[in-house]
Amino acid sequence: MFKNIINLLFPKVCMGCKSFLLSSENVICTNCRHEIPLTQHFRNPENEAFMKFYGRIPIEHASTLLYFHKKGIVQEIIHGLKYHGHEEIGTVFGDWISEDLKTLSITTTFDAIIPVPLHKKRFRERGYNQVTTFGLALSNSLKIPYNETLLQRNIYSKTQVKKDLLGRTSTIDSLFDVTYTENDHNKHYLLIDDVLTTGATLEACGRALLKIPGAKISIVCMAMSHS
């Protein structure tokens, strides 16, 4: 009853269109769920996300859930996650893409889920890593351990958004490193992030993880930038 009173006084709104949510809806309204552009990457092993890394780093699998268009509904939702503290969005997307990943045999080979890390200063500024709830939802649904300590960001950097691929890769390889033991050898790591754009950040993270003897990597993101 108390929860009903709270919902009456402070009604929940959709993170996409800002309309009031029905009692049966969670975070994103039914209309927005139907409007969200799905990539369907899980249906094609050599999808556009996988090909983004072709010739750059060896990966076993890559996929994203949604297409990210400027001023589109996915941008609105992910900005709510990244800049306004709506971490429940990551949980929704993690549960959603988990159902797709469960249909793939490669999912059974993942040994740990690794988030793209924030620098400690950035973490203090924001108060959270925007991919944490996404990773924890994947971990819970797929029964794969979540490890946020293996991969570290060494350097506090300004936003990468307005830099082109060459400008990013000239400095980004030094941003990440790994701290590992023999127990981390010969593992298949699922690297996760919010939005796949040029792939430079994920490539740098992948290169760091591949320093671990026998390591293999796959990549899953909430969304992929699409023109």
Image (tube, rainbow, N blue to C red):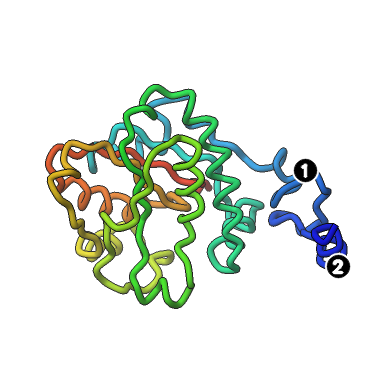
Label 2 amino acid? Leu
Q: Which residue is mark 1?
A: 31
Q: Which residue is mark 2?
A: 9
- Residue that appears at 60% across and 55% down: 88
Q: Residues within 10 Å of mark 1 (few under 14, many from 20)?
A: few
Which residue reaches farthest front?
Answer: 1
The answer to whether residue 17 is left or right of residue 172 is: right
**Quadrant of residue 33 in the image?**
top right
Q: Earlier in the sequence, mark 2 or mark 1?
A: 2
For the N terminus, the quadrant is bottom right
Residue 56 to residue 127: above or below: above
The answer to whether residue 142 is left or right of residue 83 is: left
* Secondary element at image label 1: helix
- From the viewer's perspective, is the residue at label 2 or at label 1 nearer? 2
Label 1 amino acid? Asn
Q: Position of residue 122 (x, y in %)?
A: 40, 73
- Residue that appears at 28% across and 64% down: 153
